[in-house]
Image (spheres, helix red, strand yellow):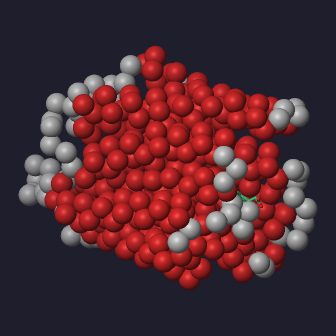
Amino acid sequence: MHTEKLRLDQAPPLAVPVSFFLAAPVSVAIAGVLLLLDGSALLTSAWVPGTIALVHLGTLGFLSCIMLGALYQMIPVIAGTPVPRARLAFGALALLLLGTGSLVAGLFLGWPLLVQLARGALLLALLLFLLPVGFALSRSHSAKETTWGMRLAALCLVLVGGAGLLMAAGHAGGAFPGPRGPWIQAHMGLGLLGWVGGLITAVSWQVVPMFYLTRPVPTLARRAVLGMLAFGALGPPIALSLGASATVATLIAAPAAIAAWLLHPVLIWRAISTRTRKRADPSLRAWQAGLLVGPVVALVALLSQVSASPRLGILLVWLAVWGWAGVIIHGMLTRIVPFLVWYHRWSPLVGKQRVPSMRSLLPQGVARTGLGLHLLSVIVGAAAVLTGWDPLARLTGATLVLTAVALATELILTVRPR
Ligand code: HEM
């Protein structure tokens, strides 16, 4: 494993990233229970508050929760500047969970007061996270594409969070900030392409060569992906605020969609095919599965522009959140958490006593089962959205609960004291 250029000595306490990772499966389980209770009613229209609640269990409760934990870990190690007051992270996590929980409950039950509570908690969570993280990122002299990707992701988090908090006022007894369509369009692009796409691509430049001993992706290609993501995520809100039409904003967003769901999959797939160690562990299979979902997301995004069917919009969000980003992030956890636990707990003991191998910290069969269940839930969920068949939606709920239990088991087995 190539770890030479990393400042692992600056990493925060293990409990910081791990607390975020351990909290994430709870949202997946709640999403599963909601689908078991309400079935296909949650998968028919993007305007239904219950659907928006479900989406945010995925985007805030699962993806963002893991991504915040990962950023606390990666900024000191890769960008080379420690995040000040790392222990504030526990406050940010508690507020993120309170905010996501009350947003979901408030939307699902139609209680404006809970949505109002969510706005306050999420605003504080974002401030508590972004102020120290933004400080560390702005002080870093690193010019690596990974550091720039993290900066782009953090900026997009400010904007997607800000837009989300303003829009949530419309569900908290107040007014919606403007015409709903353009606001959601800008919010989705900033969230899925800038925040999630920015971080996944940035991290991939670092972790894929490091864990799978592949050749690095050429610098020019990395810069092209970063530039296209920045243009396509930040351009639409600017254009829409200047009065551009939804069609123009969509055209401006296209380079980011191409970078995240077509170009990046091709680049990483090619890099993986050059790896020197041919053994494929479950995390590598997850990378491959997530990369294969990328072009399907791009196709659905295109179809959703030419078809009036609301199902395609839901399918796009389902595949992007749970299929593409969700599978890649789940797979990365099965590789990164054993690495972190081994580094923090066992590497100081090397040469002094017998230490377990990194691989033995998470039995591969458990990781394979978790990722298999995750992929099953993606497929059943896509079928449920497309057919609108209620039993399939409830079955999706069951597979989500099973995936959450499996992911929690993977994490607990890896981090438990030995
Ligand atoms: C502070 C954080 C956030 C808040 C308060 C928030 C709030 C909202 C609200 C209120 C809506 C619905 C607007 C309407 O009534 O039509 C919405 C839609 C949406 N948001 Fe967020 N959001 C947040 C963060 C995010 C993030 C980080 C992502 C993606 C990574 C995201 C993805 C989406 C998507 C995809 C939709 C469309 C929902 C649908 O298709 O049903 N949001 N958000």
Q: Nearer the viewer, residue 218 or 43?
A: 43
In this view, the residue farthest toward the bottom is 37
Q: Where is residue 385 in the image (x, y as percent from the top left)?
A: 54, 63
The answer to whether one can see residue 250 in this image is yes
Q: Where is residue 409 in the image (x, y as percent from the top left)?
A: 32, 71
Q: Position of residue 190 (x, y in %)?
A: 66, 43
Q: Nearer the viewer, residue 20 or 58?
A: 58
The answer to whether one can see residue 344 in this image is no
Q: Quadrant of residue 412?
A: bottom left
Residue at figure coordinates x 56%, y 68% from the top left: 388
**In the picture provided, is 90 more to the left or to the right than 176?**
left
Quadrant the C terminus occupies: bottom left
Count numbered badges in the picture.
0
Quadrant the N terminus occupies: top left
Q: Where is residue 312 in the image (x, y as percent from the top left)?
A: 60, 52
Residue at figure coordinates x 46%, y 29% from the top left: 263
